[in-house]
Every structure is written in C-alpha cells, then in structure tokens.
Image (cartoon, rainbow, N blue to C red):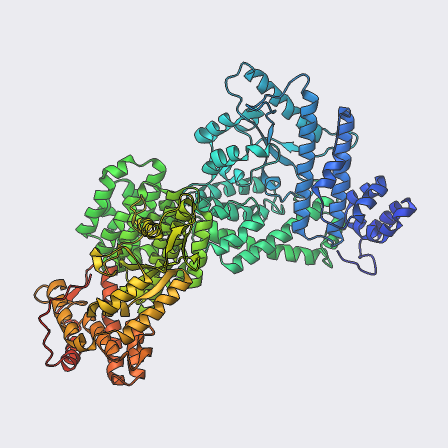
Amino acid sequence: MPNPPDVPRGLEARAAHVADRLKGLPAEVANLVATAQRVGLASDFVLDVLTRFPRELAARLDDRASLARSALEAALNLGDRAEAAAMTQLRRVRQIEMARIAWRDLAGLADVDTTLAETSLLADCLIEAAAAYAARRLEPRYPAPRGAAGTPLPLLVLAMGKLGGGELNFSSDVDLVFLHPDVGAQPEAVEAETHYQRLAQLLIKLLDSNTADGFAYRVDTRLRPFGASGPLVVSLAAFEAYLAQHGRDWERYAYVKARLVTGLEHAPEVFAEILTPFVYRRYLDYGVFDELRQMKRRISREVARKDMAENIKLGPGGIREIEFIVQAFQLVRGGRNPELRTRSLLTALPLLASDRQLRDATVTQLAAAYRFLRTLENRLQAMADRQTHELPDGAEERQRLAYALGEPSWDALYARLREQRAIVEAQFDKIAWEVEGRDGREVAPATGAWEAGEPEAMLAGTALEGNEGVAALLGDLRRGGLYQRMDEVARQRLAAVMTRTVALVASHEAPLAALERVLPVYRAICRRSAYLALLNENPAALERLLNLVGQSAWLARQIAEHPMLLDELLDPRIFDAPPTREELAEIFERTLRNADTNDAEATLDAIRVFQRTAIFRIALADRLGSLPLMKVSDRLTDTAELVLEFALHTAWRELAAKYGTPQCGPPPREAGFAVIGYGKLGGLELGYGSDLDLVFLHDSSGAEQETNGTPPVDNERFFSRLVQRLIHFLTIQTSSGRLYEVDTRLRPSGRAGLLVTSLEGFRRYQVEEAWVWEHQALLRSRALAGSRRVCAAFETLRREILTAHVNRAKLKPEVVKMRRRMRAELSLAKRGGFDLKQDLGGIADIEFLVDYWVLASSAEHPELVEHPDNVRQLEALERARLVPADRCRRLKDAYLALRQRVHELALDEAGRVVGEDEFRDLRAWVVSVWDEVFAGVEPQDEATPPPA
C-alpha cells in the first residue's frame, strides 16, 4: 500500500471525505487513524465498517496473526438465538472480518495468497455455523436421519469454484452443491428428503437474505445436478448416477475444485467413489482441450455480446484463461498423476512444471499474472464490497484503484494490466487453441477423402500419389471392423490424425515403412480415442511419432503395446538426453508416492510404467538424439538398479512383517543380505531387453541362525523365500507386462547350487571349486543392493579371489577353449553373415582378450580389477603398460563400435547379425590381435562346463 506524503492528485475531495468520517472515531482507536486515512481512500467498505464497529474492528486488527478458525468459531457460536439475531450475527462477523482482511491487504500486511486463504476460511466458518444452526432449528419438526450407529447423517455442503479451491475473492458468490448420505429404503426416506431440502433452504436463507445488515453471502446453487431445474439436494447415489449418465465435460472442470465444507467424514464416499473417477480418467485425456475451446468460445461470445472486453475475469487474458490452462492439464494428466488433483491453482501450477507440461518460465509468468489479477480483483471489489470484474469508468475511481495497487497513475496501472493480460492470452492461445491461418480462422485438416473411404484421393497432390501400397494400408484401416465399431467422436479424431499423417509421411524417405509401423499404433489407440486427441492437439508430437517409427521398429512396437508412451513425445527435450540417475530416482519416488501402496498389483503396474517410460526415453535419446553408448548403458543400468532396490526393500519388508528379521551369532547381530549383479548388469553395460544375471549372498553365521519373529524360521529358509519373492516381483507377468527376465545360473554350482549362498560358502567355492570361466564372470560383477556390510564384504572378497586365487597355469588354454566352444554353439550367423557378438573378431573376442590380460596380471596389479566393465579395464591395462596404448585404444573403439551397432539393431528389431562385409577391417584386426596373444595355445582335453 503506498504511503505518499501528499494525497494523490485527483483524490483530494475523497481524502477530505475520509478525514471527515474519521473525526467521530472513539479515542481508544486513534492509533488507527493514520492507516485508516490511506485505507479509506481505497475502500468505502472498510471505512464504513470502521465507523460502524470501531472498537470491534480495532480489536481484531490488534491481532497480527493469521486468521484462526478457533477465533471465528467462537464468534459464530449462534446457540439457540432467534433466527433474525442469528442472521445479524453472521453478517456482523462477516463484515468485521472482511474489513480486517481488506485492511491488512491494503496496508501491505498480507500477501494475496494469505488474503485469498483467509477469505475462504471465513466463508467456510460462516457456512458451517449456518448449517449447524439450521440443523438445530429444524430438528424438532424435521428430525435428521440416523446412521447405523444412531448418529445424525449431516447435510453435505460441497464448495465449488474459488471457494472450493481455497481462493475466494473479496465479494464473491459462494457456489454450493448440496448432497446427503444415502438413507436406503427406510419408511422414513421421504421424511429424510424433506429434512435435507428444508435444511438447505434455511441455510441459504441465513446466508443470502438481504436484511437491514445486508447479506452474508450470495449463494449460487446452479452447479447442482440438472442445474436450476434439478432438486436442491440429492443423495450420493443419485449424484453418482447423474454423473455417470448425464455428466458433461464442463462439469469435470467444475468439480476439479469441489471440496466438502460439512460432513467431512463422508469425504471417501464423495471423492474416492464418485467424483475422482468422474473427473480424472486413468489415461491421458487430451479430449478435454476441445471442450475447453468450446467453453472459451461460449464465454467469448458472451463477452462480445455484453461488451465485456475490460472484464478482468472473463475477458481476453483474464483470470478464467489461467484457470482453463491449469484445469485442462489437471484433467488430462490427473488420472495418471494424483499429485495434480489439487484444488488450488497456485499449488497446481508448479506441479505442471515438474510434470514437464509447462516450462518453468511459463509457470512463473502465469503465477505472477494470476496473483496480479487476483489482487486487482480483490481491491476492485473491496472499494464497495460489490462483486464486479469490470474496470471503473470514472476518473476518481480509476485513480483510487491505481492508488490501491501502488501505481502512480491509472495509465501506469492499465499498462501493467495490458502487459499481464497479453502474457496470459499468448500462453492460452499457445497451449489450448487450434493452429490459425493467416486470416485468423481455425485451420482443420481436410478429412473428406478419409471419411468417404477414398484413400487414393487422400494421396492426390502429395508425393504419395499413385502409391498403391500406401493406399492399400489406408483402405484396410478405413474399411476394417475396428473402424466400424468406433463412435462418431473417435472417427472424427482418427480422420484428422490420418489426414495429417498422410501429409507428413509423404516427405519421409521410406513412407510405406513408416506407415506400416505407425498403423499398429493407431489401431491400439483407436480403442481409447483420447490418445488420438493427444496427437491432434499436439502436431509436434505427431511429427515426432512419425519420425521415430521411421527410425525404429522397436520404438514403434513399444508405443503400440503401451500407448501411454505417447505422452513422452510432448516434450522436445527428451530427444536431447534422458534423465540423470538423480532425476530417475526422483521420478521413481514420485511414481511410488502416487501409486496405491495398498494394492500390490497397482504398485507393480506403476513400477512397470516407470521402467518402461525410462527405457523408452533412453532409447529416444539413443536413436534420435546424441546420447553416447556408454551413457545409454549407464541409464539402462540405473533404471534396473532402482527397480531392483525397491523390489528387494518390498520383499524384505513383507517377509520381516511375517517372520521377523534374521538374527545370528554369537555374538548376536542381524544377518545381512545382498544382491550381486553379474554380466552386463554387473559391468554397467546393460542393453535393451537384457536379462538380469543375479547372485544372492548373506552373512549369517554362528550356532544361532533364525528370525526374531513369531513364529521364527531359520535364516536359510528366510533368505530362500526372500529371493523367491524378489524374483517373483521382477518377473511376474501382469496386464502391463513384466519387468525383467532374471537369470540365477551364475551362482556357485549353477542350477545344482543353492539359490542363496553365505559369504563363507561363496568364498570357499570360488577358491576351491570355481572354473576359470567363473572367475571371468566374477570379473564382471559388483554388489547392487542390500546390506552395506555384505556389499562391502563381497567387494573385498571379489578382489581377493581375482588377485590371489585365479589358476593362471590353466588361464590361457581355458580362455581359448571356452571361446571356441561359444563360437561354435552360440553364433547366430549363416553363410555370408557376421554375428556381432559371437563370431571371430566380434564383441566376445575383445571381452575374452581383456579377461585374459586382467586375470593374468591381477596379482601384481590389483588395480586392474577395481572396475567391472570392459572399457575401464582396458584403460587400466593401458595405464599399467601391460598392453600397448595404441592397442588398448583401438580395442576400446572397436568394442564400442560393435556394441553401438548391436544397440541400433536392437532398436530396429533386427537381431545381431550383419553382412559379412560390415566391419571387415575391424574384425580382421581384432582377429590378428587374438592370434598374436593366443598363438600356439591348444585347449586342454579336460571337460569344462559351459558358462550359464
């Protein structure tokens, strides 16, 4: 609030009037006069309340704390007073408290967020007090229905609009919907209906009647089922039936902000069972944008008809457009992300940035514009406690409003308002409106040829004209049974998507292949046409879809099987790089927070959504971005580790709740457990569709080994069941697929061995019984999850075995023998082909060379086994000068090039075999290195079991 030394120009007469009104104030409120002179310039309402109730308002202003519910409830204890006296008290409390709120706002003692929250709290308390008083007054003549426990069943008052969102403006109506709990088919059912009708009518009268003291709130009940023509109060069963049969899209917008003011104990019935399923779809519901535009058109026509261009709520760039933006995204995504189901716009806005729907800068701009517009709205209405959103015409009123907002002049205020409205209007048009042509009219694709079933005509005038293959594909979809079963809305959406698709694929290098890959996606999403709306609402997402299906058959199949992945195409940033490990962890935590942890299958599905989405985003950055191969493997490995850690935590928690935790000793302690990753997972080289090679260890020892639960079980059984539960969690097939395939054959003694092994038993096996290939496998291992103590013990044990217990006398012949056997048995290549992994000069040859060099020298150079991956082991060999630097670098480059090709083929679902001419020189050089290192080595005849 400005505090100029002089009265602003143009407000001299107003200032004199305020000073004259203040002369009659009691002496004990003299300390308010200086501030009252400033506040009175901006608000007739506050000045009037101050002169009518000076001591009461002064007492309330002495309380510098935020408005407290307890203080309001004490002031609104209406007891058994007469109806007229009750109405007087409601109005008096409302006027004094609203004057206090306005005073603090205008004097700069409260920000707009606090002002909106306190205005809403005041309304809540007045409604609650009126409802309680009405119930007491009616009880003798119209007794309240009783529940099973004999307690009265309350009237349920549902706050809508800004009151529901806790953002009520200064002089607003309160939008209310009245419900009541179901009373069944009791003989008293008719009397119950009468009770609730009378109760709602009396409640409205107490608040809305215009008495000598004015009114408390204007009550608007037109948002109830069937509007003004429907019953004033409906049962929950009737409410649910109405929404299911007659609920319209605009009502979904309205009920985003719905909040119970009374009868809070019935909130689960109202929201979990009725409103949440109606408002929020389980899938991405982009169809709401079309309804948003229709709602905006209707409002715009009304604004134009009534010349309301200067309306700060409904006019261009006004409050309603910000609400539309936020609520549209809430409806689209709230079914998948429960965090977005907040009633508060200012709470929802930053969530849209973290959910990647709006940029941070956009959120900042919209939040600032919203706060400015709501402040302007409040101070405009506080001038005379009048509900208005129209800017004033008179010069003095304009100057007063500018003064109230701390602006030096009306022109300065209006310039600021234009700036904020322009920001809002631009964002609204960008987010919610159709693409416009140069004449400003909305542009929609010409869908006539598709709707007429004439695919050849769709291709006319494009690069695909006369392409019989493309026409045949289009015709098959248009004439197929799936299309015939679609409703009219879905057909219209598909027509727009197909018409745009033809225009876009016409410029592709291989249009027929792109169309063949994208049509299964369209067939999948035709069953849920909101995904078609997503592509129509986001032309850039459609372009990205067609681009990626042209690049990758695997990505196309992933989307066809899991259409929810289309959501990922809305953010262009995903092509640059996938989330970091930290960002993946945050996304995973949010996924779990939003999941129903009481529903095991729902939790599993949520985790599968996370895993599938993460891998999809990694693949996009791999195929269409510039993500290096090693970063691809790192992110795939990160994803697997996050899922594995959660699976282990969940399995442990379930078993510990049933049996207690495993103990051992003496000395007594809790036994630990750890998951060890082998192979590509252990070596940080995970690929698309890789199995998880896992080994499970524990450190239970001593004479006493059992859990501390009731009943206890021995630790061996606990750990065995833990592993079984963990594997079940990772591999169970549900409606959304499975997480990973798990391979446990690398455990000691393979399939014949125990599923989980003690550290002591693992060491004994590795030292006394392990084959050379098992030490090669150990080289590619690391502890992933579980007890830190066991993980650290494993890493120490791994280093000891690889440096002190490798049979180096047999190392070279065993490596050669195993490699020959693998080439013979595992190569997938036919004549004229090259298996990138198993054939001569391929990936496995490089891996075995590195294995040999590291294991041969690890006793003298233990630093060689510090890392489990091939690349860093090559770098360690170079640093130790055990292998020439040029050779190490060339092998590293060859290894990465071959793995990169495997990744590319995986994304195109093309196996791992290429033509024999590909990589010819690289292969020849790798073979020459192999021949040099293993020259003259003949494998021993002793039988060696194959690696798992």
> Vertically, is 7 above or below 629?
above
Compared across the picture, whether 222 is left or right of 770 comes to right
The image shows a total of numbered marks equal to 0
| Residue 598 figure quarter | top left
Q: Residue furthest top?
A: 187
Report the front residue among 274 and 733: 733
Q: Residue 8 location in percent, x, y? A: 80, 57
Report the front residue among 307 and 326: 326
Report the front residue among 257 and 272: 272
| Residue 773 figure quarter | bottom left
In which quadrant of the rendered image does the N terminus lie?
A: bottom right
Residue 265 shows in the view: yes
> Vertically, is 60 above or below 776?
above
Residue 384 shows in the view: no
Compared across the picture, whether 666 is left or right of 724 comes to right
> Vertically, is 698 above or below 177?
below
Q: Residue 646 location in percent, x, y? A: 40, 54
Q: Residue 945 location in percent, x, y? A: 15, 64
Report the front residue among 809 and 127: 809
Q: Residue 277 location in percent, x, y? A: 45, 37
In which quadrant of the rendered image does the C terminus lie?
A: bottom left
Compared across the picture, whether 707 is left or right of 105 comes to left
In percent of the image, x 64 and y 53: which residue is there?
372
